[in-house]
Amino acid sequence: MDALADPIKTPLQRGIAALRNTLGQDAADALLQPAPMRADEAACFHFPLPIDYTGQERRLRIGFPSNFPRGLLRLNVEPSPWLVWPHATKSGLCLHGFQERPIMGSPEVVVEDSLARLAQIVSLSKMGSNQATRDIEFQNEITTYWSFQHGQSFQNLLLLDRPQAASQLFALSDPRRAVPSGQETVWLASNVAALKGHYRRVVGRSAVIRAAETPGFYVKLQTYPDIRTPDPEDLLLWLKPHLQPDDAEQLLAWFELHGTLASRWIVLELPGGADAPTYCLNVRSLGVQQERGAKFGLRTARRRPAIANAHPPALVRATALDVLDRASILSRDISGTAQHLENARVVCVGVGSLGSTVAIQLARSGVGHLTLIDPDTLVSANLGRHVLGADSLGRLKASALRDKILLDLPTTECTAYSTFAEVVMSSKPEVFDNADLVVITTADWQSEVTVWRAKSSGAPWGLLQAWSEPYTQVGHALFAPAGTFDGRQLFTDVGDFLHRFTEWPGGGVVPLPACGESFIPGGSLGMTNIASMVSHTALRALTGKIATASWVSSIYRPEDVLSLGGQYHGPKLPEGTQQILLERGWPEDKDEMV
């Protein structure tokens, strides 16, 4: 239709013509009526709709904004079917619930797409439509309907663990603000130990929590309460029929016991599986400043009156709740990979520019246990391509990265040893004995020899040695599965790879004005490319998708090597290819390139 559209017609004229075509010319002639326009509209019409399942006659208001089609078609149903029709809002209709994408395009496409989505909403709500199908549509977006009615609290919550049964929740306000604002995030947990652990991760020191208050309660809904939310005083009556009897009894007892608190939270886990979405209610008492939330310290429970003088609920609001459990953190990866990695143990030998990026990527991919080994300290020259920032300058890389991982991804177990791999292998052999995979990125030949020596003796863990060639245009990874393997013959006596793809003056290593210190030049983006290759190889090894000795190489724009002062003699890339990954068996002789 776009190709045949009359270029002389204005977008408005084309939109109105598309409206008449979509409705049908006979229906448009008989039923489409001009309607009063709003200040920013260029045209407006009324059109009758089928009688809905409640017996109500409604009409559709169709408004063309002045900037149509950049401004989308405005569809409103009169009288409003808010809380009667699925996908109806207080101000109109939500058309994004279908196809999960915005409406955009030419005037014809905008009109046709808008009316097609409207037709689906009407089909759910017209007389004779299926109630079960309509209920499912409501339930799929029920938290949106509830939150529109409740309004939003100014205070956010962080749930540190997802209880497996109905449970009261201990609370601690985020202590990092020197001056309380009344809007500090509140941490909730079903046990005090979880609060202590999070305090230590965030603040950097331990806390003695003597009397944590329990202003929250977590409970699982068995069925869905009504889409219409009740008055605050009827909240428990609204919830009770949809809870297990024992859970309802616990909730009522907790609610009565904590009636003196100005602010309480009820976390509702929606019906469904163990990882079902949650909806959080903030129950507030009369007289509390609405824009200020409660603050909970290490001994707040001691201030609760011994004899409760309960305050009836005066206001119920929705509260933003983030859940720090593994399922929530990794929920956007629906490939299933993370499910196989929870018990995986990876030892990262070297957490410099390459190793630190690999460690972070493995943690974010769901590896459950990481051990970091590196004796070096972070200096300012590292910041351009290291995952750590200026706040960590002067700290040992291994311990600083451990703290970052524990803070950012608290469901990951991470330990650090700020020493050499051979020291850990000698003094704590269980670190390597319990590993599934060892990833070494040190570019330190002595450490690499130590690890390969253990591997050549039949170590049960897989080994992945990875490095970047100078200027990060090329990177390599050698993988050895469980069993007896020795990759030392692929390197010179000083650790240079015999099958490298680039040659550089002086070996490409830049010396530093200190005894024996140097660095391999290269930028952050090139290092990230190589790190991604290494991480993918590690994940494939951990999930059993690669089980033989393999050599993986990342090559990016080899034609740039010459301009950087080097020579490239690796495999030629197909025309038009900017980057490529190669995977094959280990090279068998010195002259093998691919």
Image (tube, grey):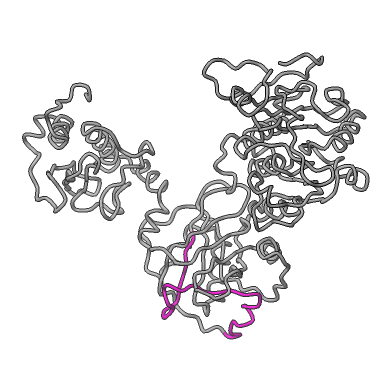
Q: Main secondary structure of the magenta part?
A: loop
Question: What residue range appears in magenta?
Answer: 280-307
Residue 467 as seen in the image, left or right of residue 183: right
Q: Residue 153 versus residue 220: which sits nearer the camera? A: 153
In this picture, is 229 found above or below 456? below
The image shows residue 47 at horizontal and vertical percentages of 13, 42
In this picture, is 498 found above or below 451? above
Magenta span contains residue 281 = yes
Q: Residue 70 versus residue 98: which sits nearer the camera? A: 70
Q: Residue 259 versus residue 395: which sits nearer the camera? A: 395
Residue 592 as seen in the image, left or right of residue 71: right
Residue at the location (38% across, 63% down)? 151
Residue 229 as seen in the image, left or right of residue 276: left
The quadrant of the image that shows the C terminus is top right
The image shows residue 290 at horizontal and vertical percentages of 41, 73
**Residue 446 occupies quadrant:** top right
The image shows residue 129 at horizontal and vertical percentages of 29, 40
Residue at the location (24% across, 49% down)? 54
Total labels drawn: 0
Residue 575 as seen in the image, left or right of residue 370: left
In this picture, is 540 found above or below 292? above
The image shows residue 453 at horizontal and vertical percentages of 91, 32
